[in-house]
Each structure stands twice: as C-alpha cells, then as structure tokens.
Image: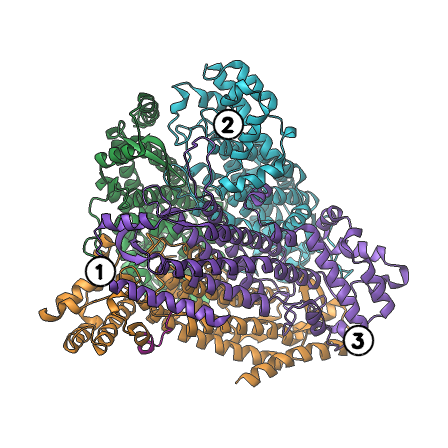
Chain colours: A green, B orange, C purple, D cyan
C-alpha cells in the first residue's frame, strides 16, 4: 500500500504529530525566533527586531506547500522560509531575520528538536512495554515452557525467563535512546562555514541550547554527523529489540504451538477462522524497514568539507522515517505485550509431549535470573 | 526536514499522483471490479453481481483515513476496504464481493498497477534526459577536457565522451526498468493459499492480466518475491546512473574547476554570491536513500510459507518510496541535464594549465566512441 | 567465528578455487598476456614482445603476498604486479608490458573473468537444485498439506505446489544470473581516462572480449558501473530465492510440524536428541549477509569523473564475498533439497487435526499449476 | 581484487592477527579451559578434569581446516571442536569437557574476546590519529582557508578549525568504541536454552567474566543481540568519522585546489605524473563497505526463540569483517593524518583568488573554537 496508508495503518498518532510538515516548519520558525531573541540579549541585534521577528514566527502564517516547492531551486526549504519570514517582518527589521546563521543551523537544530519531541511518546510506549514485560516475567516466573533452538524443541525453560530476556534487551535499547536524546541531540549554530564569526564571541550557541533544551556541542557540527548517526543507530537497535519480541510471538502463536495469542487477533479477508498475530506482523513490518535506512544514514556520514552536497539533505527524511517506524513499532508492541494471552496449559501440554519431568533445578535457576532483572528494575525506580 | 516537505521539495508531481493513498485505494478497487467482471464472464459469479460491485468501486465513496486506521487490527487495509465495499453493495450481491480472492491478491496486483503507472512519467523523464545527453555528446564531440582519476588531473578526454558515458549507463538502466515494467509487474491471483481452487479451472488470472495490462505469472507468487526484488533492484541501478551524473556535475561545477554550471544555480540563505548546484544536490539526496531501501526489500524476500508475517507488509511502503525517490531524481536530472551550461573556454583553460598540446589521436578515438553510441541510439528509434 | 572458518564451514570448494588470491592474480596476468598478444596482432607492439610477456604471465612466478602489501602505497595491486611483470621481462620488451592500458582495465576485466568462472559451479548447483525441485513437485503433485499464512494454519495446498513455487523463483533467479554472465560481464579497455587513444583505432577491445569470452562493451565503463551493480543485484535476487526455501524448511521441520526433515540433520554440542536443520541454517546464514553487501555495491555506483576514489576499490572484495556466499548457499541448498525427507503421513495428520475433508477441486487446481511449470521446463530443455 | 588481496593491500597486520582462524579457535579453546577451571573451583567438575582439559586447549593440537569442514554438518564449528577436544582428553575426564555449556556460549564469548583484542590496536591507531589531528589543529590555528559548501567556495574558515572538526568526531567515535569494549563485550553462559540450570546456582558466569576481562551480563543473551548490534553500530560510526577525513583530503588534494597532499602520494600504472591520494582512497574503500554490513547485523537481530536459525550464524563473519575494515581504515588514516602536507601558501592563494581580506574576527572566533577542543583534550589526559 502507499506510504501514508501504511503509516496510518501502523499508526502512532502522537509521534506523527511531531513529524508532520507543519511541526517541522514550526520547529524551524521556533529556532529563528529563539535565535533572534538570544542574539538580542547579547546585543547582536536590536531587541525590537527580535520581538518583530518572534511575533511572525507562527506557523499559521506560512504556506508550507509553497515553501516546499520553492525549496527545490535552492535544494533547501530554509531559503524560501526565510524569504517569507523576512517579507512578513516590517522593513527596518528585515536585515535581522536569520542574521548570523545559515540554512543548516536552522534545519539541524529543528531536526534535533523534532526528534527529541517525537522520542517522548516513543519512550513512553517503550517504558510501558517494559513494565508489562516485567509483570509478565513475574507472573510466569514459575511457568515452564519448552525452549526451542534452531526452531527445534531443545530443553525446558520458563516463560518468565523468556519475558525477562525480552525485557533486558528493551531496557538496553531504552538506555541508548535516552542517552542520544539527552546528550546528543544538539543545537547547531556555526554560520555559513561553521566559524561562528558572526557571533562576535557571544555565547549564543550555549544560550540557544539551554532555551531549546538541547545539548550544546563543542563545535558546530555541519559535516560532523556522529550525532545523527548515533540517533539512527539507537533506533536501529531499539527496532532489533522490538522485532525480537514480535518474531517470537508469531512463532509461539503458530497453530501447532499455540502457547500465546494476541489479545485481539486479526481477521482475514478470505478466511474467517484465522486468528492472525496482527500486532506482531505490524511490528515486524516496521522493523524490517529500519536496518536499510540506518545503513543509508551511516553511508551518508562522510560529508564534504563545510556542507555536503546531497548526503546532508538526505538525512532528515530518513530520520523522520526511522522515528515514524520506531514510533509505530513501539505503540504496536505496547498493545501486543499488554494484551498477550499466555496459554499455560498448552505450554504444559507441549512439555508433556516432549516428555518433561518437572525439575526444581530449572525453576530455581530461572527464578534467580528473572529475580535479578526485576530487582535491578525495582531499584532503579 | 519532514518527509512530505522533502518530497515536495524534490518534487515529481506526476509520479506523486500515482503514489498517493487515493491512487492506491483506487487501484485496489479497480482490481476488485475487474476481478468481479472477469469472474462473471466465466460464470463464477452472476453478471448482475459484477455490475453491482463495479459501480461501487469508485474511490470517492470510501473513507481512506478510516480504512487505514481500521487496517491495524488485521495488519491489512484490504480487510476494512472489502468490508466497506461489501456494505456498499446491495444485499443479494454482497457474497460475491472479493469472491475467490485474498487480501494479498488485491494488494500485490494494485502495487504492480501503481508501479507501472508511476514508471510512465519516470521513463519519460529518463528518455528525455537520454535525448539531452545525446545532444550534449554530439555538440561536444570535439570539446577537449582534462580527465581526472582519483580526483587528480590525469590525461585529456572530451566532454562529449563524458556525456556518452553517462548516456550508456542511463540507457542500460532504462532497459532494465522497461523489462521489469513489461515482463515482471504481474497480476496476483491465488486465493487464500495460492491454489486457485476457487477459480474452478477458469482462466481468470490470464484474463485479469490482459485487462489490467500486467504480466500473467506462471503461478501465484505470494511468497515468491523475485518480481518485487527485481523492481527494487532496477530502481537501485537507475539511481546509480543518475547519481553518477549529479556527482560529476557537482565536481565539475566546483569553483576551482568551473567547467559546468547548472542552468539555474541555487542561492544560499546566508551567502548571496553562491551559485549552488541545487538540482545535482537534490538528485544526490534522493539517490543516497535508495540502496538501503533496496537492501530492505532484498532482505525481505525470504517470506514464510504461504504468506509472510511482516516482510510482505513492509514491501509496499518501500517500493512506493523507491518510486518516489527515483521519480524525483529523474525529474531533477532532466532539468539538470537540459539546462547544463558548459564552459568550453574554461575547459580549455584547465587543459592549458595542465600543459596539453591538442592531439588528433584523442579526438579521432573519442569521436569514434561517441559516434558508436549515437549511431546505436539512432538505429533504435 | 572467523571469516575463513565460516567460509570453510559453509564450504563451496569449487567456487572458492575461482575466488582465491592466486586465481585473481592469475586472471590479471591472463588479461595482460592476451592484451599483449592482441596488441601485437594489430601491430601496436612487436610480436616478440607479446611472446616475451605472455611467457612471464604465469602466476607461479609472482609473490602474491608482496604484491598485496606493496599495493597499499598506490591503492592498487596492479601497480606492483605490473612492476614485477616488467622486471621479469627481458629489457627490450619492458616498455610493451601493460602498454596502452591502465590499472582499472586489468582489474575490471579480471574481476569479470573471475566472476564468470565462479558462476559456473554456482549455476550448476542451482540447476541441479531446480531438477531436484521439479522431481519433488512431480512426486508430491497429489500430496495435500495445510497451507499457513502469517504462520497460522489457513487452508490446504499441496506440497507439490509448494515445491513448484520454490522452483519458479529459482528459475527466475537463474535466468537473471545467466543474463548477467552472458551479456554483462565484459572486458574493460580504455586506457588512463577511457579514451582508447592508445589503441589507434584498432579493434583490440572487441578482440580481447572474444578471446576472453566476455562481452564487448559499447564504451569503456570505468565509472559506469551498471554491469557491476547488475551482478550484485542478480546475486541478491538469487539469495532471496534460496533463502525462501531454507526458511520454509526450518519452519516445516519444527518439532511441532515435522512435515519435512533434512537428509542428514545436524547434532548439537549439548543436546544429543536434536535433529537440527543444519543445511537450512547455513543457507540462511549466507543469505542473511547478502542484502547489505548489495546495498554497499549500489551505494558505490556514483563513481567520480574518470576513476573513483574509494568506491571502485571497494567493489571487488564485495563482489568476491557475494559470489562466495551465493556459492555456499547454492551448494548447501542443493544438498538440502536433494536430501529432503518429506513425511507424507505427518502432513496428512496435520490436515486431519485441521479437519480437512479431501477435496478434488484442490487437487485438480494445484495439479494444473504444477503441471504448467513442469511442462514449461520440459519444453525448455 | 580478491578478498584476501584487498585485506593484504589495506593492511592492518596487528588487527588481522586477532581475527585469524587460528586466533578464533584459540579463543574458543581458552573459553573452554577457563570455564572448566571455574567450574572446578565451585565444585561442578573435578579439579583433575579441569587440569586435563586446560592442558589440551592449545590451538596447536587442532586441525583447524578439518574443524571448519566438519562444522557444516552441524552448522556449528563448536561441535567438531568439542569432539576433537574430548578425544584429546584422557577417558575419565571426557564427560567434563564442555560440561554445562552450549555451542553458542563458547562462540559468543570467543567472539567478544576476539573483538576486544582486535579493538586494542584499532583504538591505539585512532588515539594516535587524534593526537596528530590535535597537533595539526594547533599548528594551523591561524591558517586561513576558504570554506566550501556544496563544493562551492563559500566563506573563509581556518584549517585548524577543519582539523578540530575532524577531531571532535573522532573523539566521539572513540568514546563509543571504548564504551562497547568496556561495558558491552560480555561473556555468554547459559547452557542449551539459557537457563543456567547446569550451574546449580554457582556464580560461574561472573567468575568467567572476571577471568576473561569481559563484562558480566545480567542474563544469558543468546537471542538478545543488543551487544552485537552496538558493536557493529559503533564500528559504523567510527567509519563515518574516518571516511569524512579521507573524503575531505581527496577533495582538498584535487589538482585544482592542491591545499593538502598525502605524505607519500601513490603512483599510477599508466600515468607517472600522478600523485594519488592513495591512503585516503584506501580509507574510503574500507568505509564504503561498512554501512551495508552494519545493516546486515541489525537486520539479523530479530533472532528466534532460544537460538536463531541463520541470523546468529551470520553475525561472526560480519563482525570480523567490520573489525578488519575498521582496523585497516584506522591504520591508513593514522598514516594519512601523520604524513599530511599542508600547503599554506596555496591556501592563501585560493583565498586571494576569492578576494579575501584578512579578518581578525574570523581568527579570534575560530581560535576560540579550536582552543575549546584542545583544552578539553588536555584536561582529559
């Protein structure tokens, strides 16, 4: 199906709101406004100019479609955006619009702002998923289940330990996303070639970072893309954690295993008896698209001299798409884990078929492992 | 910037029209309508049912956003689409809606239809680019230029030969896209698990293919994804051909080389003197995103049993994005090549600085090579 | 495990022989020798020089490790190779060694030679796999099996149709590999910047192509990499076909389904009762690595001006690795398919559990589909 | 060229020594020996058995090629390795060989050991490169250079700031690699399905971690692959940092810019006047291959249930290749940066051509930025 229809189907409405055109243009205008205000505070532009600019930086006043179209001629939507902003500001102040900055300063800062905001609902979904997994691990700390290696029955484990395994991965992925959000999403402010000459030694970059709640970088990072690469990689790692849960659910939900079922299994357009693991399928469909996008971002990191010709411009749509896919996968996984039905008697039946004799050693060992994870989490609250 | 803003900036309006939600839903409805009609022709459903269905298969009657949202519960937008279509058809005929088919039949066929239609303007742009390159090759068949290997001046070549080199690659890529369009984009019709049991031996798949102007496959191909992989690969190869042109233009347009300039160079938000190779940058920004997406499609080819859990559902958005990126790259390359300004005196100046003495051997050899390409193209008309 | 240990485990000895250092250096020397001979035939160098060169182009006379190490200083192993060859040739003829050519001419031609030779055993394995699949499809044309969509039991199909589905994909992939081998693997001969000035109008490129049994390109293709991209893509598509078979076998071989078993299932270092689908696992382990490598090759297609700085040099190791992985996957799939044990009674048992009543419509429809594939193959012999 | 020839050319001999078959088998044997010893300490096996095992765990006693070949039947080289080790140990102790563990415990731990050891010379090369960049940044803190955006001359910067920009990225990448090395490369010890039942509550995993100087995981992580994904991602990010330096050097070294030259430029097989940026080309050739491999590792993270069928087995060769490529890129970058010749007068000449009037604001601003980086580094010593 088409891209938007897919997005709508996998649906993460709250994340989407942060990733829209409108949100993106609003973020760019917010950067221009705060930059003008901070420039005025240190005397780089008149306070009246900053006020006149800020008041015009409302997204409602801009024709977003037109900005997109006119951006083509410059390979940058900031050029028409600034032109429209300048035109909206009264004459004596026009020269102060976008003063001392460059397209990439605005766009990179806006991208980090948008990413930080989009990560909020994503992290909330992942945290709730973690809570649900912890509850499942606790509830099934003594539920034996046959373990399967290379998709063959191997030896018994417990479903609590399976959930704890999913949980540890999720927690690691969460830690990575939080680190990127708090330490790596940063303001960009260097001027045309990154020298900050136009700031006349004023700490505008630091102040901008504080105002926008983004990290302050050591240097402008126009062609130094570790931050963007880390964001992409942390999304890739989180998708790996979510995909593993969904993959396992589709396997355990197979008709012949039937050890788990989704809370609201999906129907089929042609087979009314089907109980499809629809949420898991959506999670896998999202995660499947992630690694290639991460590779694209990593491949684009070798950016030329003071501004890249192509590789930089390709980043933002890839990052937006990665956030969208992770957001959808996180929402669907939350629903999936929250609603998961565990068929304990079927697990016991499959163990019987395997010929298992209950085994205290297994329970005590698996309980110790699960307990370790749950205690660490409880302590971290 | 956001995804849609990027799309709007790189702009390929004609291609976009074929890739919209609306176009996709319309294509699915078209498949349902033609399938009903062909089923009626061979007696599988009553002719009145087919008529009643066809008349309701107008996209205007459907709430696309609702279809997207409701698709989540089934991991398929076809389920709510068919439900809405069924509800719209008068009672006695509802049982014949979507008869003998399955979600994937509709979606795969619609994807191929959409891809075929989106390829039309793409191929037109590529063909026009080829014509423009042929004209450049002819015009500059005797324009000497220093060749550069590993970005170091090496030995002289001609700009005509450079253009012919771009052209041969483009022609190869075009041949690949045409082959996929004509031979590989196919109807899908297998029913729930691909057995065609529901067709009672009737040649509905062949007739559907003829009606929709798509290839007829040997078998239903629900989890056999060579066709989709080939489509992705052919787009990847075409992006390689376009990216090479754009990469070379950015290099030749460098201030210090200045051998070519774009027809309408872009401006900068902070540096009025800049003459940015904006079209080339857009082409590179599109092409940069392609290989990772192709990898995602190839990685998703190992689909499970009779319908994949995740890998199939991930395909359509990736294919749509690939078509969009290629469409934008093709449009921008057409503009780029059509408007390219070649500074012959600067080429001569750079050769002088290198110390070149004009050389008949070079001209005769390069002319022979260019002539070979142009004659082959002329003969192929 | 380490790279070489992995290669040795997945093992495709015949393919490996064509991909060794020794084979690669031998191919480069073969190109130098034949080029000298063809240059002599058209009078570009003295016949005695060609003879003196050819006699020294035996790989035994070269220190391959030294050539590798010394290549670093030039980012090209051809520079030290040519130096050693020149040193080995008697003085009056040294000037004719490598005359009129450039490193990339030798390396690209050698890469195509090596690829063509490595494809021979790969195609043989794939063809034998196709024969084995055709036999399975015929043998099980009437073996009913439950079909599974999204890993849930759906409706019945036949195992013959499953095999025919695998076969059609394999045949498509084979056709793609054959096309690349016969039409796209080409000689390269352009001289330093691709102008062929040094050939003085002589048809050396055509003659070289004929002698080496490679295609003759329209132009030198130093930075036009469609051919290499197509080779990578065709390997990616073939890996998709093989991975699908192996994925399905691991699923059908699950303890709980047990419908197929590998001929010689693998053991475990800790669980003696395991019957692991070891061949399938090896095939999947190979195929898993392919899409990323294809993306790397596609991303490297935008090569700069007359010779790329990095992207070209990255190609050969990627292509060699792709051939190795496909070779191993093809060999293992041949063993897998050739030895596959089909448990017909288990298939029947799983259908009983589903509640199936044998259905003539299913058999006649599935038989017609399988028959179509087998007749097409029989006709193509 | 062939894979091994490429490896030999890009050459990182010290890294290679840690990545060989021999090193890998030695690491697996080291794990078996230390595991036996730690198992004996806690009373799980007799001390005499541990001694008898340890003494046989010398790689010299094993036929590595045979282990590779025999691994195919089990899709695991650990099975034949353990068989050979068991055969080498005197009879009463054979049952204690590999006791309480599983193939994946040995292989994952060995992979982490090998990775940790291979990272040592890589980090040393990167640290030395950082020192050299810091020295360049200091030396050229006042060297003005024209900045270039979208490959067009834009506004002046300083070469010191350019070097500081490279350095900050490298430091970030280094921090990521160190974090993975110190916190994420871990032992694996779970037994067949990850329950540690066989350890009878003994802290063998913790002790093993201490002995092998690897991290202790919270749980066995057989199908939880965040650690491996993070290793791959950190290599991908480091390759981005190195590739950017090399890309910029190739651009600045262009004949027409000529602002930097490699210390020992490479020659050409056909053009004696060429001064090729050979080291940069090698770095780019290595880095070009990295993103696709990272994507492959990320795509393989969704591993099935208690042991993956294919995705796990594909990891080790990909990780080894990533380490090899990063090792080679690091070594070549160290040489490149250490030997870089900066043509200050040419930089001045290019600024003159641009029409620059020296500008104190630029120098004071750029110096402040560079100083900030150098002070942070000095403070961190």
Circles 3, 2 touching at the beta carbon (< 8 Å): no
Q: Assign a secondary structure to mark 3.
A: loop
Quarter occupied by the N terminus of chain B: bottom left
Is residue D365 at all visible to an observer of this figure? no
Left or right position of D119 against B29: right
Query: Which residue is label 2 attached to?
Result: D214
Q: Is residue B211 magenta?
A: yes
Q: Chain of mark 2?
A: D
Judge depth for marks 3 and 2 and give the one in front. Answer: 3
x, y (%) of residue C181? 58, 65
As drawn, A277 above or below C130: above
Q: CA distance from mark 3 to mark 1?
A: 70 Å
Q: Chain of mark 3?
A: C
Question: In which image quadrant can residue D303 be found?
Answer: top left
Q: Is residue C157 magenta?
A: no
x, y (%) of residue D273? 77, 60
- The answer to which of D337 and C180 lies nearer the viewer is C180
- The answer to which of B148 and D368 lies nearer the viewer is B148
Circles 3, 1 touching at the beta carbon (< 8 Å): no
Q: Chain of mark 1?
A: A
x, y (%) of residue D282? 64, 50
The magenta region covers B209-217
x, y (%) of residue B77? 25, 60
Query: Which residue is label 3 attached to?
Result: C42
């Amino acid at each position: 199906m088409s891209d938007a229809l897919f997005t709508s189907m996998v649906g993460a409405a709250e994340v989407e709101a942060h990733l829209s055109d409108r949100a993106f243009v609003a973020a760019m205008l917010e950067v221009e406004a705060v930059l003008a205000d901070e420039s005025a505070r240190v005397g780089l532009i008149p306070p009246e100019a900053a006020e006149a600019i800020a008041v015009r930086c409302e997204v409602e006043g801009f024709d977003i479609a037109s900005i997109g179209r006119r951006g083509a001629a410059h390979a940058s939507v900031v050029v028409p955006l600034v032109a429209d902003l300048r035109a909206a500001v009264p004459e004596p102040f026009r020269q102060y619009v976008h003063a001392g900055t460059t397209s990439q300063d605005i766009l990179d800062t806006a991208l980090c702002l948008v990413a930080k905001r989009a990560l909020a609902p994503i992290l909330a979904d992942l945290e709730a998923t973690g809570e649900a997994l912890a509850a499942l691990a606790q509830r099934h700390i003594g539920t034996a289940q046959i373990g399967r290696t290379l998709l063959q029955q191997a030896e018994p484990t417990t479903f609590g330990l399976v959930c704890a395994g999913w949980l540890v991965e999720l927690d690691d992925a969460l830690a990575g996303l939080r680190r990127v959000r708090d330490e790596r999403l940063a303001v960009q402010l260097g001027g045309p070639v990154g020298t900050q000459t136009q700031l006349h030694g004023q700490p505008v970059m630091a102040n901008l970072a504080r105002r926008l709640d983004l990290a302050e970088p050591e240097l402008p990072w126009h062609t130094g893309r570790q931050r963007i690469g880390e964001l992409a990689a942390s999304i890739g790692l989180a998708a790996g954690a979510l995909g593993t849960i969904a993959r396992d659910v589709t396997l355990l939900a197979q008709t012949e295993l039937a050890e788990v079922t989704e809370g609201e299994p999906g129907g089929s357009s042609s087979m009314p008896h089907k109980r499809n693991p629809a949420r898991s399928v959506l999670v896998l469909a999202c995660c499947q698209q992630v690694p290639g996008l991460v590779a694209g971002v990593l491949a684009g990191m070798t950016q030329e001299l003071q501004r890249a010709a192509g590789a930089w411009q390709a980043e933002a749509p890839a990052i937006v798409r990665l956030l969208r896919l992770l957001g959808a996968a996180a929402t669907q996984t939350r629903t999936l884990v929250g609603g998961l039905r565990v068929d304990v008697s079927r697990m016991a039946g499959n163990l019987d078929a395997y010929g298992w004799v209950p085994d205290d050693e297994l329970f005590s060992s698996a309980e110790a492992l699960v307990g370790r994870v749950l205690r660490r989490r409880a302590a971290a609250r």
